Image (cartoon, helix red, strand yellow):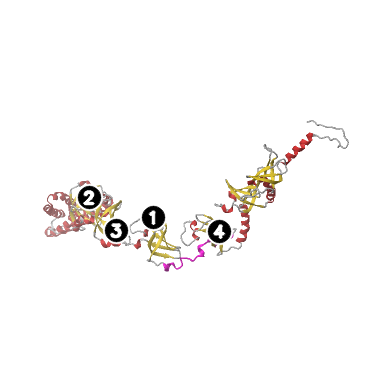
Amino acid sequence: MTTQETAAEPTDGAAPPTTENFEQLLNEVLSEDEGFEGRVLRGVVVAVEGDHAVVDVGLKSEGRVPLKEFASPGSDETLTPGDEVDVYVERYEDRDGLVRLSREKARREEAWVGLEKAFEKGERVNGVIFGRVKGGFIVDLDGAVAFLPGSQVDIRPVRDVSPLMGTPQPFQILKMDPQRNNIVVSRRAVLEETRTEARSELISSLKEGQVLDGVVKNITDYGAFVDLGGVDGLLHVTDIAWKRINHPSEALSIGETVKVQIIRFNSETQRISLGMKQLEADPWDGVAAKYPVEAKFSGRVTNITDYGAFVELEPGIEGLVHVSEMSWTKKNVHPGKIVSTSQEVEVMVLDVDPDKRRISLGLKQCNANPWEDFVTKFPKGAEVEGEIKNITEFGLFIGLDGEIDGMAHLSDLSWEKSGEEALAGYSKGDVVKAKVLDVDVDKERVSLGIKQLSDDPVEGAMEGLKKGAVVTCTVTQVTDGGIEVKVNDAVLGFIRKSDLSRERSEQRPDRFAAGEKVDAKITQMDKSGRKLSLSVKALEVEEEKRAMKEYGSSDSGASLGDILGAALKEKQAQTEAENGADTAEAEPAAKKPAKRAAKKAKDEDSDAGDDTPETDAAGGEEDKAPAKKAAAKKSAKKAAKASDDAVQEDNKAGDDAAPED
């Protein structure tokens, strides 16, 4: 750009000519315009048009500012023409040739100066929460907008912040970023600082038993935290009231003012336990006199567990009805299937323990005992009929009158069959008859028997039998340890292998076959087990002794063999007359031990004859008969003794070898 100079001749009375630089003048104007941008200027409201205010700041044109920027957070501000306000010049001239102004930025510029000073010194600033954003709230700090995180609102999480909004309160600046116009504040820091001061003062004056007013700050499942004015204490759910409270929210609410008593205070850990029920009278005082044993009362079911139900007799006093005391007949049933929560029931006091604060109650005692009714209606020996409810490995459970069950044991199902075999013949749902064997009212048991409906066939058969009797039995089964027999076609018996014969070589069970008849002697009787123990060997020994006793004193010239032979012949004739064809089978068994004893006695007789001194010819004939008679008696005694010894040895050997019954 060139500089133009103009010169004119002076005239009389005229000013001297001047020289001006146009470029210099233009730069001055432009520099002045650029200097206004980014500054705060004071202007005058010229007019209010709609939702904008026209403000004159002394520039070439007026600026328009939205009215909402003049209003404080939470309130409206009224402007009138002529009011002076401070505004921020954003742009000297926009595309419409107007000056762009901002009241909000002007206030922010003013506030930032004071906030920076407070942030540097760590001082608190006042602000108002006026809006909610994601993750927190918006706070107005005298024109500057700050962010309040949700975690910095209070010491503990606050569900409802409505009471805090629109109320001036102090804040602590945590962070400032002028470039991003970002300010982060905290209300929690102010509360913690104030709380620490108040806490130290309050703790120094706390003591157990002191009663204070507090505000419920938070509620949990196990209790509530109460603010005592700078320090919090725990009010446990069990200390809220004497009556049962399932959740603290049933009696308390957040923000509620309550009166509490300090129960425990630990100055080292600064933990405070509070109680509300301690301010009321204890309902357990005199409870034993108020609720005597066996008295009936009405109550309300407050809680149901697996082991019973709690019944409230009055506010603060509850008793437990154990599951075993709920019903006479319903066993192993959850209490919830018998009673329900809030149900009114009649109970009987079974026991009271004031020290442990326990009352045992009974529900079934208020109803008639079906076991007593049953024993009156069906005494011992009566016949009953019922449906099989359940089958177990030890018997049958039969449903009876009064919704009670009786049990028929395996051993009481059949006389002939074993318990397992008899049990297999029954099915669940079958209707059967049984006889009442026993009723135990205390233990709530009814013993039944099905086989007792008929007479015992074995009992009649065993009446004519006794220990030591000789019977004829039938072989039913042959085993390695002996043979199983049946006496009188009813009573079972067993002959061990060692008792099959005196001769060891004949003690073989395979000599016998099922259906064969055998004579044996009863050695043991088990009436409870309904079995007999028999022995063929004992019968043989008994017959041998009887023969020696009956025929041992015959003619002096008879030998032991002759005596036993005569006895055997007589026995044979008697057996043939009694048993007919069975004599041929029984004869060999009785003859063998007799022959063996006769042979042994004969040998001894010979030895005795050899040892007899010789006599002269004249007196020999006279002394011969008495000598032979004495020798025969002596030999018979030795033979009997030898037989007894042999029987004892065989019995001992048989007992060691034979298996148990």
The residue carrying mark 4 is 215
Q: Callout 1, which amino acid? A: Gly
Q: Provide residue 47's location: percent of width, then percent of height.
A: 67, 45
Instruction: Determine crowd level at label 2: few under 14, some 14-19, many 20+ residues with C-alpha closer than 10 A.
Output: many
From this viewpoint, is residue 177 visible? no
Residue occupying the point 81% across, 31% down: 4
Instruction: Tell me the mark number nearer the camera, choosing from 4 and 2.
Output: 4
User: Which stretch appears magenta?
Assistant: 261-290
Instruction: Tell me the mark number nearer the camera, choosing from 3 and 4.
Output: 4
Which numbered disc flags the more N-terminal residue, 3 or 2? 3
Query: Is 119 inside the magenta-drawn segment?
Result: no
The N terminus is located in which quarter?
A: top right
Which numbered disc flags the more N-terminal residue, 1 or 2? 1
Q: Callout 4, which amino acid? A: Val
Kind of element beneath mark 1: helix
Q: Callout 3, which amino acid? A: Gly
Between 249 and 501, which is closer to the camera in this rendering?
A: 249
The residue sitting at the top extreme is 2
Query: Is 267 inside the magenta-drawn segment?
Result: yes
Instruction: Determine crowd level at label 3: few under 14, some 14-19, many 20+ residues with C-alpha closer than 10 A.
Output: few
Which labelled disc corresponds to residue 484?
A: 2
Which numbered disc flags the more N-terminal residue, 4 or 2? 4
